[in-house]
Amino acid sequence: MRILEPYKDYFWEFYNPLPQKVKDKVDYVLQIVISVQRISTKFFKHLEDGIYEIRIEVGSNIYRIFSFFDDNKLVILLHGF
């Protein structure tokens, strides 16, 4: 099981204004990131230099949250778009 740790307020600045339907999907995907050992690249993809992208699709929109691992246990959530 992974621990999610937001870095400063960047994640919350992205998350809080989202519509509830999108927040529900973000919560669902983050639960997958927390609990699944081998995450599908549909939801979690390595970009480069240790940066990962968490992808959330809602309708025709794709939301992205950038993150990185700390000691292979901690996913630090950066900003999203």
Image: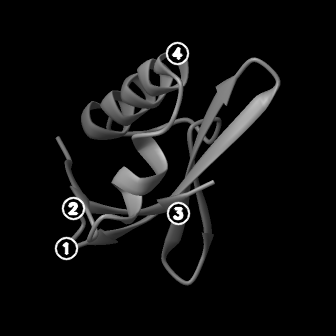
Q: Would residue 8 be found to the left or right of residue 39 on screen?
A: left
Quadrant of the rendered image containing residue 71 = bottom left
Circle number at residue 52: 3
Please report whichever mark, 1 or 3, sits nearer to the chain's N-terminal start: 3
Q: Find residue 4 and report its horizontal and vertical position in percent.
A: 23, 51
Q: Are marks 1 and 2 in contact (CB under 8 Å)?
A: yes
Q: For the residues marked 2 and 4, what is the alpha-carbon distance in whole angstroms?
A: 26 Å
Q: Nearer the viewer, mark 1 or mark 2?
A: 2
Circle number at residue 23: none
Q: Nearer the viewer, mark 4 or mark 3?
A: 4
Please report whichever mark, 1 or 4, sits nearer to the chain's N-terminal start: 4
Q: Are marks 4 and 3 in contact (CB under 8 Å)?
A: no
> Which amino acid lies under the numbered mark 1 shown in the image of this protein?
Asp
Q: Nearer the viewer, mark 2 or mark 4?
A: 4
Q: Which residue is mark 2?
A: 74
Secondary structure of the residue carrying numbered label 4 = helix
Outermost residue toward the front in this view: 17
